[in-house]
Image (spheres, rainbow, N blue to C red):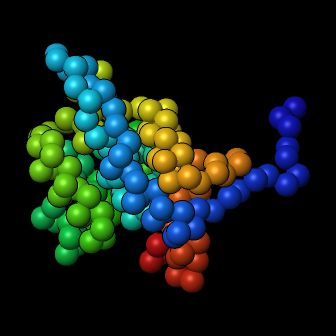
Amino acid sequence: EIPNEKNPLRPVATQDRFEAVRAVSDQVMMQTRWGKRATVQSYLSNLLDIVNGTGRRISAICQLTYEDVRVDEGGPYGSIRWPAHTDKSGMETVVPMSPSVRDAIDRIQIERPGIGAAPLFPSPEDPQKSVTRHLADKWLRKGEGVAKLSPQKGSLWHAYRRKWATERKHLSDVDV
C-alpha cells in the first residue's frame, strides 16, 4: 500500500524569493567539458525566468529545443510548443510567450545560437543532450545559498510552479 501523507508540504515561492534568487543567479557557474574545459555562467537565470513566466515543470523546460520556440507565431511575443513527451499527461500544447519569457529566449539565442533539434539548454558534458533536472536543482540550491535563503522544506522548483498557478487563481482554467 502506498503511504498517504495527511498533511503534505506544498510550499509556494514568493515574488520576493524569486527576485532574491534571480538577483544572484548570474553568479552561479558551471564547467563545460565540450573539448576545452571552461567555467561559464550557468543557465539558472534563464531557467528561472522561463519557470516564472510559464509555470511549466523544470524537466519540460530543460528539454526544450530550438524548434520548439516559435518567435514569429502564436502571439505578439511568439509561442512555445511544449512536446507531448515532456508533458506529464502526454499532451502537446502551443502556448503564447509572455514578454519576460521572450526576453529569456532572446538572451538564449544571442548567447547560444542554434537550430532544429538542438537543446536550448545543452548539457555541460555533451552539447547534443539537454541539461538534466538534477543539475538545474543543484544550480537553484546554489542560487538560494548565494541569496542567503533557507531551503523550502518539501520543494525546490515546484514552489515556483505553484507561485505561477497561485498568481492566476482568479482567472478561468481556459485563460490559464
Q: Residue at x 12, y 64 (%)?
A: 72
Comparing 36 with 85, the one in front is 36
From the viewer's perspective, tell me whether residue 135 is left or right of residue 63. right
Q: Give how far across and how far down residue 91 sits, in percent.
A: 43, 50
Say whether residue 135 is left or right of residue 103.
right
Name which quarter of the figure residue 71 lies in: bottom left
Place residue 4 in its image quadrant: top right
**Is residue 173 placed above or below 72 in the rendered structure?**
below
Q: Can you see residue 71? A: yes
Residue 71 versus residue 42 in the image, above or below: below
Q: Residue furthest bottom?
A: 170
Kindly tell me whether residue 82 is visible in this rendering: no
Residue 30, horizontal then vertical, whole percent: 33, 32
Residue drawn 19% across and 35% down? 118
Q: Position of residue 29 (x, y in %)?
A: 34, 37
Q: Residue at x 76, y 53 (%)?
A: 9
Left or right for 35, reference 8: left
Image point (88%, 52%), residue name:
6
Position of 53 compared to 107: left or right?
right
Q: Position of residue 82 (x, y in %)?
A: 35, 51
